[in-house]
Image: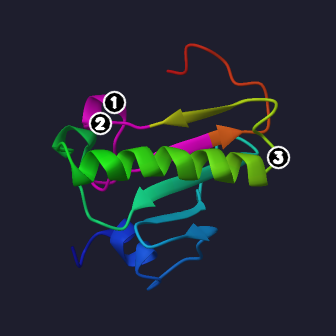
Amino acid sequence: MSDCIFCKIANKEIGALVYEDDTVAAFNDLNPQAPVHVLIIPKKHIARISDVTNGEDAALMGHMMVVANKIAAERGIAEGGYRVVANCNEDAGQSVWHIHFHLLGGRQLGWPPG
């Protein structure tokens, strides 16, 4: 989608990536909520989690979790612990209509989160 900010980031039109492979990109959140706050996105535009289908999309979501684990290890937060959050629709806090995981860590995270 030409007007999607995350598609523009994935296509390297704007911003800087901290991770990239053939199907996934990751970048630092502009408004970090923890010392480590990385957004992990599929390069394929999927608006919301509820749009994920079996097959290719399901495998892509699993790959995004593998990438989250890799980045957590690289950022030194895997041992202490980290959180992966995905919001679906307005009431859950989704504000950008492109699936993304928030990888958060580097400090004690409270519960409940919201």
Q: Residue at image x 40%, y 67%?
A: 23
Q: Earlier in the sequence, mark 3 or mark 1?
A: 3
Q: Is 51 situated left or right of 99 in this image? A: left
**Can residue 32 be seen?**
no
Q: Residue at image x 29%, y 66%?
A: 44
Residue 40, horizontal then vertical, whole percent: 50, 55
Q: Is 14 situated left or right of 108 in this image? A: left
Q: Which residue is mark 2?
A: 88
Whether label 2 touches label 1, CB < 8 Å:
yes
Q: Which residue is mark 1?
A: 92
Q: Which residue is mark 3?
A: 76
How far apart marks 2 and 1 lie (CA) works out to: 6 Å
**Can residue 53 be seen?**
yes
**Which amino acid type is marked by label 3?**
Gly
**47 is higher (above) or lower (below) than 52:** below
Per the rendered image, the range of residues in magenta is 86-103
Residue 30, horizontal then vertical, whole percent: 59, 59
**Which amino acid type is marked by label 1?**
Ala
Q: Element under label 3?
A: loop
**87 is higher (above) or lower (below) than 75:** above
Nearer the observer, 57 or 108: 57
Residue 51, horizontal then vertical, whole percent: 17, 44
Residue 71's disc is: none
